[in-house]
Amino acid sequence: MPVNAFVARSHVLHRALAYEPQKIVSGSGISFTLESGQVVLDACAGPSVSILGHHQPEVTQAIVDQLGKIGYVYSGSRYTCDVAEELADELLQESPGGLVKAIFVNSGSEATDAALKLATQYFCEIGQTERINFVSRKQSYHGNTLGALSVSGHESRRAYYRPWIADNVSFVDPCYGYRAKEVGESDAQYVLKLKQQLENEFLRLGPDTVAAFVAETVSGTTLGCVPPVPGYFAAVREVCDRYGVLLILDEIMCGMGKTGTMHAWEQEGIRGPDIQMVGKALGAGFVPLSGVLLNQKIFDGIAGGSKVLAHGHTFQAHPTACAAALAVQKIIKRDSILDNVSTMGCCLEAELRQEIGHLPYVGDVRGRGLFWAVEFMLDPLTKTSFPVEHNFSNRIVEVSAELGLNILGNLGKTGSFDVELVIISPPYIVTETEIKSIVQLLKRSILLVIEEYT
Ligand code: PLP
C-alpha cells in the first residue's frame, strides 16, 4: 500500500503510514467530533481509556487548580506532593488484596518495566539472586518498551526487535477456553492442564530460578476480552505460592473498574497479586498516568535491604496527572459509577448476544463488565479461523468508522491463534440508549462487511 499523502506531508510520524488519520477537534460525553463535522460514538473509549467520556469539567478544574499551585514536582527522592499522596491513599487505603504502595509512571509499558524490575530487585534484596527468570503467556501483550515486550508473547510486535528481547522469559499457554479447550473437556480439566503446564515450566527452569509469572487477568487486545476460565487464577496462585514465585497481574487494560469491580482479580477468588500494573482508566486519559501497586512483602524486601528503589523517571508521580486521576477516582466513588459499569455491562452483553451473536461468522461473544469482544470465525462450527490477509475484522472497524462508530480491531498476528475480533469497551458513563445505538451500528457494519465478503 502506498504511503498516504497526508502522512507523507505531516511532520508527525504516524503509526499506519497507509492511512490518512482524521483530526478529532472536540469531544463531549461518549462522542468526539471530527474536523469534517462528523460525530463519532466512541464505543471503545479510545483504546479503553476515556472511561468518563471526552470532557469532564470537574477533572478539568482539578488540573487547573493543581497547575495554579505548582506545575511540576520532582518526586525522585526528597520531595512529594499532596495529590500523589492522596491518589495513593485513595487507591490503597483499604489495602485491596494486600496491596499497600504505589509507584506512578506515565505509561502502561513503563509500569510493566517497573514491575519486572521491582520483582528482580526484591529477590536480590532478600538474597535470592538466582531468581532471574520470568514466565509469561503466549499471545499476550504487556507493553512496547523492551522489558515489557520481552514478557509479551505478541509475535508481530516482537518480530523486528528480537535482538533486544530478553532471553530470561519463557511462555506458557494463555487461558483461552473458546479456542483451546478440547471437545468434551470440562473447565476443571482445562484448568488442571494449564496448571500442570505452568508447574512443569517452573520445574524445567528450576523453581528456585523463577522470579514471577506475568498475566493479564482478563486478556485484552491480543485475544479479545477473554475472562479466565473459573478456577484458573486460583490454580495459578497455588502453583506460584508453592514455588515462591511472585504473581504479577497486568490490569492496565482490564482494571480500575472495567469489569465491574475495581480490580478484575477480585472476581477470581484469589487474595490478590504481589505486584499489579494499572493504567488507561486510572486517569481516564485526561493526562497520561499509569501505576504499579505492590504488597507488603515486596516493600519489606526493599525496606529491609538497600532502602533504595533502583528505578525512577523524571516525570513519575507528575502532579498534574495525579490531580486528574485523583479527581477521576473520586468521581467514580462519589457517583457509584461502578454500579453503572455492572448494569450497563449486563445490558451490553444482552444486546450483543441478541443482535449480533447469531450473525454469520460470529464465533464468540465474551467479556465482563464494559469490556467485550466479538470474535469472528470463517466457520464457527469447526472453529476455522479467517485467513489473516482477508482482514475481516479490520474491515468492520473501517466500515464502523464510516458509520460514526469507533471500535477496536485486532492487532495483526499476535500468536498461533489467528484471532479476528472487535472490542467494544465504552466509557463507564454510557447509557442504555447509547448501548443500543452502538450495537445497532456495529450490526450494520458487520452485515455490510458480510455482504462485501460473500
Ligand atoms: N498492558 C496491557 C494489557 C495493555 O493493553 C497495554 C496497552 O494497550 C499495555 C500494557 C501498554 O500500555 P501503554 O500503551 O500505556 O504503554
Image (cartoon, rainbow, N blue to C red):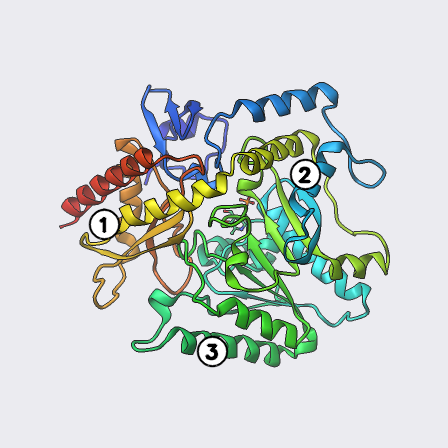
Q: Nearer the viewer, residue 230 or 9?
A: 230
Provide residue 126's location: percent of width, then percent of height: 81, 67
429 sits left or right of 453 in the view: right
420 sits left or right of 115 in the view: left
Number of numbered discs overlaid on the protein picture: 3
Q: Which residue is mark 3?
A: 192
Label 2 crowd (10 A; few <14 / some 14-19 / many >=20)? many
Verify CB contact (< 8 Å) between mark 2 and mark 3: no
Specify which label sits upstream in the sequence, 2 or 1. Answer: 2
Q: Is residue 339 visible?
A: yes
Between the C-alphas of marks 2 and 1, the distance is 40 Å
Q: Residue at x 68, y 38 (%)?
A: 87
Verify CB contact (< 8 Å) between mark 2 and mark 1: no
Q: Nearer the viewer, mark 2 or mark 3?
A: 2
Verify CB contact (< 8 Å) between mark 1 and mark 3: no
Say if disc 3 is inside 8 Å of ligand 1. no
Specify which label sits upstream in the sequence, 2 or 3. Answer: 2
Quadrant placement of the N terminus: top left
Q: Residue at x 21, y 62 (%)?
A: 379
- Give the amino acid at mark 2: Leu
Q: Nearer the viewer, residue 336 or 114?
A: 336
- The correct choice, above or below, for 389 with respect to 89 in the image is below
Residue 87 - label: 2
- Give the amino acid at mark 1: Gln
Q: Which residue is mark 1?
A: 354
